[in-house]
Image (spheres, rainbow, N blue to C red):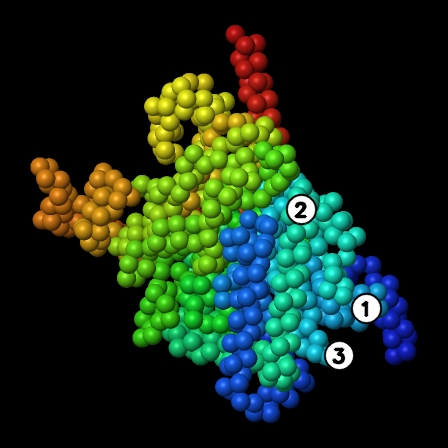
Amino acid sequence: MAHDAIDTGGAELSAEERRLLEAFMADNRLFYGPDPAIMRNHSLAPRTAAEAAVLDAGLDANRINLVRGRLSSALEETFTMIEQTGVAPGAKWGDLVSSIFTAAGDLSQIGPRGIVGFATVSHYPVQFIAKYWIDDPTVGVRDGDAFIHNDSRYGNIHNTDQSMIMPVFDGSELVCWVATTIHEGECGAIEPGGMPSIAETKFDEGLKMCPFKCAENFQLKRDLVNFLQNSVRDPKLQLFDMKVKLHASIRLRERVLAVIREFGRDYLIATLRKTLEDTEAEVRRRIAEMPDGTCRIDTFIDSSLREHILGKWPLTITVKGEKMIWDLRGACPELTNRSINTTLASLKTSLVSNLLVYVWPDLPPNQGVFSPIDVLTDRNSLLDCSDDAPNAMSLIPLFRALSTPSVLLAKFLYCMPKRYTAIAASHYNQPATFVYGGLTQHHEITGNFCADINGNGSGAREDNDGEHGLSPTFGAYCDTGEYELAEEELPYLRIVAQKLTTDRTGFGKHRGGMGYEQIVTVKNSEAFGFMTGQCGGKFPSAVGLFGGYGCPAYPLAKIKDINIFEVMKTEPDKVRHGIADYMNEPSIAGGRYVMQDAALNFEVCSEGEIYMICQGSGGGYGDVLEREPWRVRRDIEEKLLTRDCAEKVYHLRFDPQSGNVDEAATAAARDAERAARRARGMPFDEFCAKWVKDGPDSALPYLGSWGDNHGPVVAQPPGGARTVMPADAVAGIVISNPRERRIAELEAENAALKARLAAS
């Protein structure tokens, strides 16, 4: 084991014997696995002697601010460099980051348009390299070296994200680290595109790069590059973006050394550390301004990507003085053979991203933001999985972490005299996009994902409606890409692209931003297909705020056994431009119409078959009965809302002759609905007596605590028996294969039919 304590079998050892034993164990360590001392700690490292010396010297604050500005410009330059030269779709759409760390490995600054989550999780591998490779005689850390990494167990989101990490030396002194990270996509997993939904072990997930040296003397080691190319479906992508990240890191290193030449080493060290300490102090001050108290929410994940489940995702936030505690205990147990688990480090970086995007967007994005916050979890849960659990699709729980905390914090901040941004309901929080793979029209093998993921609807705000298809929940500056450019490279055609939906939003006094529909097909390839990695087809995932509705559920639809291109030629009147239009009135002869869970395991799409998904909306804010009629009318005119829905949800009434809103009738209808609400209401104790049960229904595939989040955890996987585990002894759950369950079901039906025939 990598980090076990030495077991002497109870024997007493002298100091010299212990020294020799420890030296022997260090020289003969079997495996350098993830280090819990690194991976479970998100606080700032103590000041180093060099940091203490320069900060105690009383350096000029104005010059420190100038250095910070120079570093910010350098980070922006390298971000743009990667965005303009990167090969991966994610690079072209801004799904990347450039970052700088202290010598101890704490994240100090990122590029202004970077993805916060990529950087706030990268300090873990930096600290691993510093702890284990600097003094290792077979590895070492020298000027011109670079290390590559993608394994979330050592600090990352998931395998598709690859980081290039470079030390920066001033003479012989290591003064800081720089890193660049891109969502690369294809990584050799069991399904193409890098995010396998059917992975049952970590060995199904493709490349598992713990931090290792891939470059020396500022040049990639070609043998290692060749090995990595040999391990993925798209060797061109692997090579080119390794070059892009390396040269961007070199450029960033050059800019850092230029800062040292102009301002001196002390100012660089002081700036990196002071940025962190000032940020941490400001966060503590802002927490102390909040009222003490506790807020709670329980949300549920409705799919393992292979079957429906109801997996609990709870969060309790407690404020006390200048400290905050985020408690996620009681969550769904680890799914030992499903890929939607997440490591604790990945969870934390998504939580801090929520703070920086939705609560305190004015703060500098660095590690100091989260340092004052304690995080509590159950080990071996979906949100704090073991090192052996697959986690390639950790996006399922992580996207909740990217959206949910701000909904709770809104209740603390609502009464504050000063806010740092508008309070908003939940941003849509599913990775709603098609992951693709196969043979292109240019006879190249590829696999990756689409920029559709970057158009989540935003939550309604306290003062206005949400924005349509605004951005992904993980970053404010990502683009949805140019489809025409993608179609030059891929046999992937969009029949409908980014069409805003109708009647599918988070309703409220202010409504959430609309999502959009995607209808896609394949042309000029018989070996190309799609998968999706999202849930939310049964249980709405984005919640409303202060009475606002959550988003709807968004299943996936497809029409197999057709060729839409032939339909366009021969029966163009049967071509539709919306999911509901196709599925509510099936009109294409011979088509097999399928409505299913939002998740789709990879399958080949024959030319002309169509696949349909819907990017979701944000949650609503406030009571629907308080929405101003002119806003409802505007939504109807913009075809975001039907008149029927306006009448049912917003209780609007229209003049039958003119079609205009009847203000008096609307006021009466809303008063009637308020009276009906009061009639439906009941005392809390009476409500609990009627609705609260001792446990989940036996037919429900429920996973998580029931009632008290600190109590026992219930696990009833699909097709399995119910188990109940103590809160402090949660164990992973194995879910049977859906195909085997289906076979057993059909065999039982067959046996029953045979019995009936025999009886007759």
- Packing grade of label 1 (10 A; few <14, some 14-19, many >=20) is few
Q: Nearer the viewer, residue 534 or 754?
A: 534
SS at circle 2: helix
Name which of mark 1 and mark 3 comes first in the sequence: 1
Return the residue at label 2.
236
Task: Tell me how far mark 3 sits from mark 2, CA to CA.
Answer: 36 Å
Quadrant where the image shows the N terminus: bottom right
Looking at the image, is mark 2 or mark 1 earlier in the sequence? Answer: 1
Q: Position of residue 332 (x, y in %)?
A: 54, 51
User: Residue at position x 46%, y 49% from top?
Assistant: 480
Amino acid of disc 1 = Asp
Residue 138: give x, y in percent of width and height: 84, 65
Q: What whole-number distance in Å separates the C-alpha atoms at marks 1 and 3?
A: 17 Å
The amino acid type of the residue labelled 2 equals Lys
How far apart are labels 2 and 1 at the CA level? 32 Å
The mark found on residue 136 in the picture is: 1
Secondary structure at badge 3 equals loop
Q: Rate crowding at label 3 as few (under 14), some (14 to 19) or many (20 or more) other CA atoms within 10 Å.
A: few
| In the displayed structure image, the side of residue 29 where residue 329 appears, left or right | left
Q: Count of labels shown?
A: 3
The residue under label 3 is: 172
Side of 597 where 722 appears, left or right: right
